[in-house]
Image: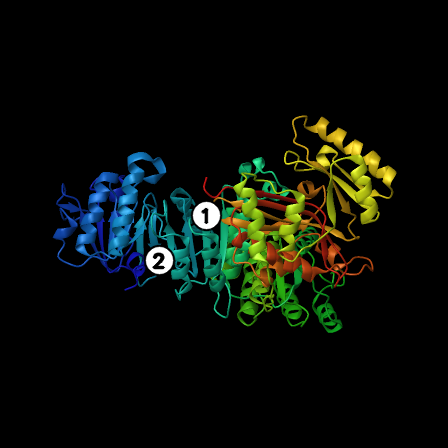
Amino acid sequence: MDRLDAIFAPETIAVIGASTQKGKVGHDIFANILFGGFTGTLYPVNPKAKSVLSVKCYTSIANIPDPIDLGMIILPPKAALNAVKDCIAKGVKGIVIVSAGFKEVGGEGAQIEKEIKILCANAKVRLVGPNCLGVINPSPKVSLNASFSARMPTAGNVSFISQSGALCTAVLDYAADKGFGFSKFISIGNKADVDELDLLRYYHNDPDTDVVMIYMEELSRSAEEFISEIREMTSGTNPTHVIVIKSGSSDAGARAAASHTGALAGSDALYDAIFTMSGILRCATVNQLFDYAQAFAANKYPTGDKIAIITNAGGPGIIATDMSEQSGLNLAKFSDETIKELKKHLPSTANFHNPVDIIGDAAKDRYENTLATVLSDRGVDAALIILTPQSMTDVIGTAEAIVNIARNSIKPIVCSFMGVVDVSDGVKLLQKHKIPVYQFPESAARSLGALREGVKWLSRKILPQFELAYDTIKAKEIIDKYLKEGRMILGELDGSELLKCYGFKTLPMVLSKNKSQACKIADQMGYPVVMKIVSPDILHKTDAGGVVVGLEDSKSVEDAFETIMGKAKAYNPDARIEGVLIQKLAPKGKEIILGLSKDQVFGHAVMFGLGGIFVEVYKDVVFRLSPMGRNVARRMVRSIKGYPILKGLRGEKPSDIETIEKHIVALKAMADNHPMIKELDINPLFVHEEGEGATVADIIIRLENQED
């Protein structure tokens, strides 16, 4: 027996802490297992009771004559620790601790949880909790409700994972109203042992699970481990579709960062990166979680992004059209044959083009004929059907017609039966036949868009990795020099040399100490030039008025030197000023930003986006973590809103996108090779036309002492 099978499909269960007192958790969990129809054998354990609900009670798990697969523990921390020891001595394969008072309260509770975790790990016993709702398996073969939720859900092909036990009871109640079934349902609480990754591995191999819903508060694994494993599960010919809602999206911790990258790299941005790289679909609300799960559970996927909308009301059709486009879908253009066929079945007042308005008095046959016609069009990948309940609307008949057509169609069909009371019977019929149905058209359109995103993930392009060479020895020498001297901010000259070690093209630059030296350097370098203040105490030079660009002669260089020095001293009178950097003006190109930020939990993240002084205003940036290669970099570049600018607008030639991808991969290699880099900004990086590379214009690199 798989160790998690002992939790989800045990043959014998001991409830340690079973109570005779109704309303106690120990009583209710025992009652839920007993009256939920559990197909195995159940034993209550309570030294003070002879029986619980007429079932013989045992003073200790050791006294039970049969082997025990699962120990359910409902005891306070100290007693729970002793119960765990008894369970291990008995040879149980799995333990669920429902009780609270452990790590979540700190102190002694946290220490006891740590002891329990070690005991279970050494004994190879899987532990769920503590501080959790329990576990539910509605399969008729098991029929297990080992939780303090009184509701046993219907069986389905969606499994649920939650860190919150209280949310679980609300989810079960909501699911019952929606006719939504589950394959497995579990609350993991403090995650002392079993966590999301363990469960996703199990669900991926579970023939009854096609879709997994997760409520997540925090990830306890390394990002690289999680991404690498989940990416395999969500890919291939037998994928598990994973949908998550992540709470706690505040990024207050990013405010103290020195670089643009650090300021933008809040924890929520990194979770977004983890989910995107894993092929996990992220939702904003619990409603959306159910909406998407319902769509994926139907196991029909659009092969393209062209949809047909059928409606008996104009307004909802327009709403669906707007949301479809916002969700990455496009309205299909019907063939002449389709329009000709529609005219046979619809009144002259109908709209025969997409969205098809079949008019408010539409009966069952009008919906049926229209749906069959548009689905037969090769240019249609999916259909969205909207029904508003008019006095003449045949809600049940229309639902039956949709069910009959869906039975013989491989194309996904989603419905919006608007309203509540008047459409309820039709909604129940659609739910019974696993046809996604929503109250409002926006939800239906978003869910179709989510399906399309899932298909795009499965069909993503995989290219061979770049073969890149780096001068890691020289790079280490540069960094070690700063660490040895106790300096944590790299000067721009050394920063430029470090980037060159990783394949970046930088500009000629020389430090000047006075006006005459600045003029001489500029004359030798050749105009136009850029001048920048150099100070370890002034990181964002533009903010201090410490940058002047496009200088064409020595007089302008002389004036700029005085201006820059004056503004720098006014900006920070205590700043240590090393001089003014003279730099060759960068060739024209599109401004982007590349960066690194080191997170305490997930390690280094690479940032890419449109650059310049407004990067923190527009925030058109994305983050990615390890594992980082060409394909991640490629999708990263194409994911920002400003990608069309790089691709070329209005006759412009495309930018050198492959060079951006190589630089992204190189930055992650730099972070892996030199973990003492805390933050790095290249802003702007001027990207030139295709084949002409990119040029670094400005750099900030901040280190951290690894010994601190």
Residue 31 visible within the image: no
Q: Position of residue 448 (x, y in %)?
A: 59, 59
How busy is the neighbourhood of tag 1: few (under 14 within 10 Å), some, or many (20 plus)? some
**Mark 1 residue type:** Met
**Residue 93 quadrant:** bottom left
Q: Position of residue 457 (x, y in %)?
A: 57, 63
Instruction: Determine which residue is flagged by label 1.
Output: 216
The numbered mark, 1 or 2, whose residue comes first in the sequence reads 2
Mark number for residue 138?
A: 2
How busy is the neighbourhood of tag 2: few (under 14 within 10 Å), some, or many (20 plus)? many
> Which of the pair 121/355 is nearer the observer?
121
Q: Is 235 displayed left or right of 89 in the figure?
A: right
**Residue 469 quadrant:** bottom right
Residue 467 visible within the image: yes
Quadrant containing the N terminus in the rendered view:
bottom left
**Mark 2 residue type:** Pro
Contact flag, marks 1 and 2 (Cβ < 8 Å) = no
> Which of the pair 521/401 is nearer the observer?
521
Mark number for residue 675?
A: none
> Which of the pair 539/65 is nearer the observer?
539
Q: Is 221 displayed left or right of 488 in the figure?
A: left
Task: Give SS at disc 2.
Answer: loop
Q: Residue at x 53, y 54 (%)?
A: 673
Q: Position of residue 432 (x, y in %)?
A: 47, 60
Q: Position of residue 160 (x, y in %)?
A: 42, 54
Foreground tag (1 vs 2): 1
Q: Is 615 displayed left or right of 183 in the figure?
A: right
